[in-house]
Every structure is written in structure tokens, then in C-alpha cells.
Image (cartoon, rainbow, N blue to C red):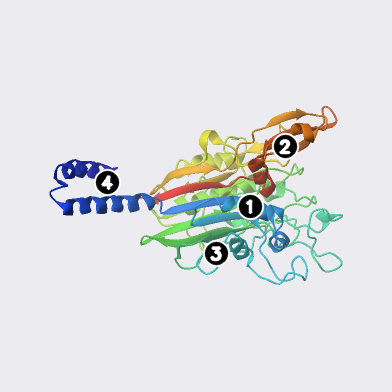
Amino acid sequence: MECIVSIIVKIQFIGRHILKNLYLFLALILLLSSCSSLFKSRADLKVVHYNIKELDSQKIKDFDIQVQKANEILKEFDFNVLSLNEVQYDYPNIPNKSFTSKGENIKKFMMKLGRDYELWKTSFYPANTGQRAQKLNNQNYPANFQTPNIMNYADQWNFGIYPGQYSSGLSFDLIPYGNPIVINKLKWKEFNPKVNLNKFKQADGLVINKNIELFDKNFVDTPVEIDGEVVHIITLHTVPSYHFGNKSSPNYKRNADQLRFLEWYTTGKTDIEVSLPGIQPLPPNSYFVALGDWNTDIRNLKNQGSRVLKNYFKKVNVWIGENYDLTHEADGYHPNRLKLLLDYIVTSKNMKIIKGKIHAPSEERLFLGCEPPNLEKLKLPAHRVLVHYFDKSVGKKCYVSISKKFKNYKDASDHFPISADIKLIK
């Protein structure tokens, strides 16, 4: 704004003298140019976070329809930091011997986006998810949840059916500052000694092991350098605050404690006493951006994790969408499908979120009834598609027309991407 006011004043002055002094005219051009550069560089960080549902090595290898749609969506965005959830950390021979790479899936995905392999750095580490999964009799891991008796092979501590499933990754074209800090071995009882694990049970009915990790996936702090300052980019994908049919599930409490760790690590304090000799919180006044699918809806204060977030949001700058919009919705096109706010971007108080957005295009829903429509008579325009859902109340498939763009987003994931432009305050 100061730059604009300065230009207006100078224009008034130059307007009276421009014919007398060509140098003043050239000075005006330079001023406009400098302000234009200022506007272009307002955001020090342009971040996008996206939970791409179950993005595994096979999908990336095949460049299947889901990867294609996610690719098309992300190509529309301008960003220098991309956070991705639910990407398989690729290990050799997992889930079978046809896979040979290690830790390359984020780079492979970014190459599909057309991002330069050498310029774009990655921060990608294996989740705890599936690390204790069991192999089938053929010595391969099950590749999907349709395998018979699959839960007999699943990791009972951290879910997942093969090691590295549901990992998180970061890609950026900024300057790395040292090595990322990866926290995945921290035991839950070390962080919160007062947690009573005996009251929780695994999906197989056994009492939770006392050595269970705090994070079912991991917690990663990736420091980068921006304009001479160190900025910590923190990625976290928490356990869902949902029981999945196990009424003695630890998920609600574990979700809350994972978010307590985030609060403690970034601000130095949470609502429980924390003493971890091997791990230190960020120094006061550090610059940080934390983002991810935190798997609890801030509007539902029955969840312990949501209550932690409510307190945490008082200490940070947060952008969670206009009118608390959804970031996740259940598969399919039923009119009453579950919709939740689960994904978040927060920054330290010495950073400013210039703008944010949940990228959820309009559904443009048009109900067409519960009898198969005559496609010739329907004549949908090119930007609309026909989809259906099963309505139990009438025992039939029902049909709706929606926007093609909305369907593309639904094909890509059960989450919508979120973005924020962020400025350092000095």
C-alpha cells in the first residue's frame, strides 16, 4: 500500500513536469517495475497440502486414473511446498518382488507433475504404519484389503497391511537447512506417562502393548531457509479419531496426544507436563508452518483431539476455510454422505497467512430420479457427467448429474486439497 501511495504522489508531480524532464518519466517506469516485483513476491511460501487416498507404488507405476486426476488437479496450483499424505513409502520387495525402489515415490509423483527432478527436494520417510504386518504364505505382503482374512496379517499396533503404507511426504523448491528431524520411535508412555493403556484394546482384542509408539505414522520437521531465516515445515498425519468398530480403541486418546505433541513441539507447552530429554521443542519465536490431515473435526468438541486443537489454535495463526468448509467427504454421491473438516494449515505468530483456500469445486448437483435416464434425451453438456448412488429407502440406484470437475476431484481422493500463501513477519 505504501508503494502505491508513493506512486500516486509521484505521478501527480511528474504529470506537471513530464514533458520537461524525460528522466522523471524513466524514474516513474522504474518505480512501477519495483512495485510490481514487490507484489509478485509478497508470499514467501505458497503451500499446498493434499491427502491423496491410498497412493501406493502400483498406482504410481501404472499412472492409473486416480494418479492422473490428482496430477491434473495439482498442475493448476502455484506452490513451492507440497505436502502429501497417504503415499506408500516404497521399499524393495514390498508388497512383492516386482518393486525395487526405495523412497522414490514422491519424486516419481513430482516428475509426473512436470517438476524438475533435481530442483525439487523431498523429505520422505517411512510411516510406522504396517511395519509389523505379516507376510502371506507366498512370502509377499497382501496388496489390498480384499485379501481373505486380511486382518490376521495387519499391523495391530499401527494398522496397515505392509510396511510404509500411508506415509507422508514433502516436496519443495526451497533451500534445505540441515537435516529433517524425524520422530517415529517415541513411545506413547514416554510422552504421556499418565496414559492408561490397559483400558484400550487392539482390533484383535488384545490389550495395547506398553511399548506402542505415540505416532502410528511419523512426525517430521523439515527446516528450510527463506530470506536468511530458518522456517520449520512440519508434516503430521494423525491417527483417525474414530473407532472403526472397536469400542475400546485407543484412537481418540492417541489422536489427542499426537496433537498435544504438535502443540508442545511448536510452542513449548501443552496441557500435560512433557519431559523428553532426547527431543527439544522449537526455540521461542521460531518460524514454522504445520500442515496435514489431523483427523479430527474442530467443530466436534466431543473429540479429545478437537479440544486440543481449540487450545492450540489460540497460540498460532490458522486458516481453516471460509465458514469451516469441509476438506473430506465419504466416497460416492449419496446426498447425505459424511462430510468433515480434517485438514489444516497453521503458522507461528510471526508469520501471516495472506490467503487460504479449500479447493472443492461446486458439485452443481441435479437429481434425475431413481429410474435409469434416457441418455439420448438427457443430452448432458460436455462439462457435466452422470453418476449414481444406491438409496436404501427405495431400494434402487438413483441418478444425478454433477460437474465434471467435481467428479475429477472425487476420483482423485476422498480429501480436497488446501492451500495458503504465507509471509514472514520481520
Q: Extreme left residue here?
A: 20
**Numbered disc in front, either 3 or 1:** 1
Where does residue 86 sit, x and y in percent of width and height?
65, 55
Of marks 3 and 1, which one's residue comes earlier in the chain?
1
The reply to whether dot 4 and dot 2 touch (C-beta < 8 Å) is no
Which residue is labeled 3 in the image?
A: 122
Marks 1 and 4, Cα distance to the nearest angstrom?
39 Å
Where does residue 256 sit, x and y in percent of width and height?
59, 45
Of marks 4 and 3, which one's residue comes earlier in the chain?
4
Marks 4 and 3, Cα distance to the nearest angstrom?
37 Å
Residue type, mark 1 in image = Ala
Which residue is labeled 1 in the image?
A: 70
Mark sitting on residue 169: none
Q: Alpha-carbon neighbours of circle 2 within 10 Å: few (<14), some, or many (≥20)? A: many
In the image, what residue occupies the spot 81% across and 67% down? Answer: 140
Where does residue 392 sit, x and y in percent of width and height?
82, 31
Residue type, mark 3 in image = Thr
Residue type, mark 4 in image = Cys
Where is the N terminus found, in terms of image quarters?
top left
Which residue is labeled 2 in the image?
A: 333
**Numbered disc in front, either 3 or 2:** 2
Of marks 2 and 1, which one's residue comes earlier in the chain?
1
Kindly state the secondary structure of the residue where label 1 is placed: helix
In the image, what residue occupies the spot 64% across and 36% down? Answer: 363
